[in-house]
Amino acid sequence: MNRLIVLLCLLFCSLPAFAQQGLSQSELRQINGLFAAFDHDGSPGYAIGVVKDGKLVFARGYGRADLDNNVPITARTSFHLASLSKQFTAAAIALLIIDGKLSLDTPVEKFFPEVKKYGADLRIKHLIYFTSGLPDYTSLKRPNGMPWFSFYYFTIDDAVAATLSAKTLEFTPGTQWEYSNANFMLLAKIVERVSGMSLAEFLETRIFKPLGMSASQLNDDSTLVVPNRATGYADRSDGKVLEQLKSVGIVVRKGTGFVRLPRISPHYGGSGVFSTVEDLAKWDRNFDSNRLASGFSEQMLHREKFKHDKDNDAFGLVFGEFQGHKMIWFSGGDLDTSTFMARLPDDRLTVICLSNMPTGNAEDKAKAVLSVLLRAQGSAGAEIK
């Protein structure tokens, strides 16, 4: 009996201890202070993860994932990743390249004969690096007259069809850079046509299951249950929020509290993955281990030079710098979420920030956490000297 009690205690008491492991009391106090305003009942909030040397050393939630039922946010709360999903679509392409089934120079026309009308040499690499010239579907009118807004139902096929209905490209592929979700929607369909699986099946089989990311999934069907899902919320008293919703035909009663913002449209490729802080730490670890495939990280971090100045894009990732430290990052935002994940490879440090508020500004919050960690790292270095 005593042994059973000990085992149960280890099982149910391990998470709080784990969440504190590896950070100083000063770091913990500062990070908690960044999110104190959300750390209570009745507020949406954030999940934060810190990975050091491949280990998740801090993981904590602040606020509530579901205000209807007062469910707390934890490291196991599942958030819509929005554009952080792009790196998983890109990872599927990377694996098919490693498999020898695709290359960056494979013509898009092979899978979408419609692009032949553009008379341009459109390749996989142009989609990956946002230099295709294809207009994003959101810049075109939706055939049924409804807004391109995730509160309204539309599928990836609706979006791709709208993009490919454009009579001309916006520029010759490779000559300009323009961010576009449509690029990654086409990549998602290409993965499906090459692999013979849905993208959801491919990600589950080739990425999530091998890495033990059991709480991750691609939501290509909005009727599916997402365990531990964080519902999206925005401040009901925020005039900008109300104006934006009104502009797409959503009338909100004025007052206090929060507007609930469910994601109804199951489009994917440029978005659609749901995941947790714990699972994203496993994903981050793979960039060191290459567990998925030999040469995987090299492919994911591959950059190309085109006839424009922007050359810091990789496979759903961006190379940059933060306070003098090399940083590989990406951000996401939709009506139900704000997300940011940044890796400082030379420091072996990663910060994950997921919010169930579209106005949560996860990027700035994550960078504030990074600042705390780098200050502590600098202080420790100075003490050693």
Image (cartoon, rainbow, N blue to C red):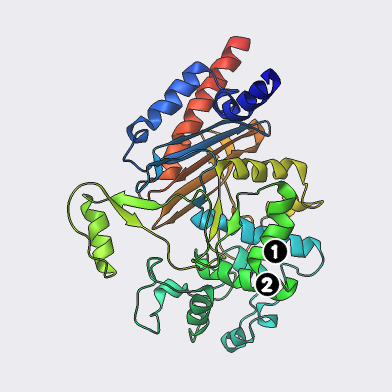
Residue 131 in sight here: no
- What residue appears at the point 66 percent right and 77 percent down from the top-left corner? 108
Determine the secondary structure under disc 2.
helix
Count residues near mark 2 (Cα–Cα under 10 Å), then give few for <14, some for 14-19, many for 20+.
Answer: some
Badge number at residue 192? 2
Q: Is residue 193 placed above or below 268 in the rendered structure?
A: below
Distance Cα–Cα, label 2 vs label 1: 8 Å
Identify the mark at residue 202; answer none if there is no mark: 1
Asked whether residue 233 appears in the rendered view, the answer is: yes
Q: Measuring 39% from the left and 38% from the top, which residue is drawn there?
A: 63
Residue in front for this viewpoint, 295 or 143: 143
Height in image: 321 above or below 265? above
Check if mark 2's residue and mark 1's residue have beta carbons within 8 Å: yes
The quarter of the displayed image where residue 262 is located: bottom left
Which of marks 1 and 2 precedes in the sequence?
2
Location of residue 19 in the rendering, given as x and y in whole percent from the top left corner = 55, 28
Identity, as a three-letter code, of the amino acid under mark 1: Phe
Mark 1 burial class by Cα count in 10 Å: few <14, some 14-19, many 20+: some
Of residues 185 and 321, the one drawn nearer to the viewer in this rendering: 185
The N terminus - image quarter: top right
Q: Position of residue 21 (x, y in %)?
A: 59, 23
Left or right of 89 in this view: 291: right
Residue 198: horizontal and vertical position, in percent? 66, 70
- The residue located at (77%, 46%) in the rendering is 290
In the displayed structure, does residue 73 sit left or right of residue 128? left
